[in-house]
Amino acid sequence: MRIAAGIEYNGLPYCGWQWQDHSPSVQQEVEQALSIVADHEVKVVCAGRTDTGVHATGQVIHFDTEAERSDWSWLRGTNSNLPRSVGVLWVKPVPDEFHARFSAIRRAYRYIINNRRERPVILDGQVTWQFKPLDVLRMQAAATFLLGQHDFSSYRAAGCQAKSPVREIYKLTLTRQADMIFLDIEANAFLQHMVRNIAGVLMTIGAGEAEIGWSKEVLEHQDRRLGGITASPAGLYLTQVHYPERFRVPVNTKHVFS
């Protein structure tokens, strides 16, 4: 039987989603908890591998098992064996052709910027801090150049191993609520550090340190060395993963801090 599940986690204690020998990972915690409930070793596949310090409210996984458990038993049993920084939100059986990564058609992230003079204390690690005043209207104007299908070589990590740098952004909006700026982005898929590199360019423009058209210039260079800074992983959340309707996979509709 193939099972899909929604996962939420605070990424601060982990080296990222993927198993690493030197540090604890979210994948390690999830697989160990599921293995206890299944009474056999469980390996999971996720929709998107997040980096060190990156959070998720809408991660999706799948795993195969011979164990027969109710959805509630999977949910309750797994959560009882997970640390407080990781939780299962839902569980459901899916067809064998479902694949958490390759069946996904859209993914969405939210990047949260705390824009004030004083560094955040309570939200440390949950938001990115930028003390320079940011003009959201300038940032939104610059963001429009990135909509659509493009070669995002300038906006991916130098070590990104994706075969193609071409991605399509369907949505890229910036909104402010008091001292918080929310960058919401949705695309068919993302390259390594793509959201953080976009955030770095837009914050530079928002601070008045570059012209609005600089985001387009960076895009057209197709060269990471000519791009902007890579913004901090703090404040980055994987919020939604969309699949074809036939799989009936729940979509997270709750947004962080709003």
Image: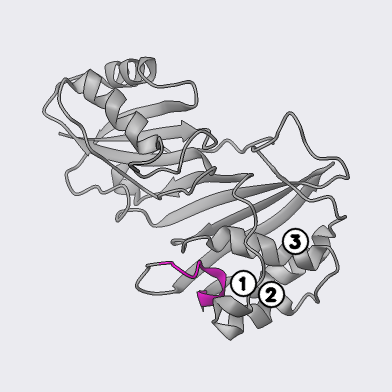
- Image disc number at residue 174: none
Query: Is 218 a magenta residue?
Result: no
Check disc 1 and give the amino acid type.
Leu
The secondary structure type at the circle numbered 2 is: helix
Tag 1 residue? 146
In the rendering, at what x and y percent does residue 154 appear?
56, 75
The secondary structure type at the circle numbered 1 is: helix
Q: Residue at x 52, y 74 (%)?
A: 152
* Location of residue 171 (image quadrant): bottom right
Q: Residue at x 33, y 40 (%)?
A: 61
Q: Quadrant of the N terminus?
A: top left
Q: Quadrant of the C terminus?
A: top right
What secondary structure is the stretch in magenta mostly built from?
Answer: loop
Check disc 3 and give the amino acid type.
Met
Tag 3 residue? 203
Quick one: 81 or 64, which is closer to the camera? Answer: 81
Q: Residue at x 73, y 78 (%)?
A: 214
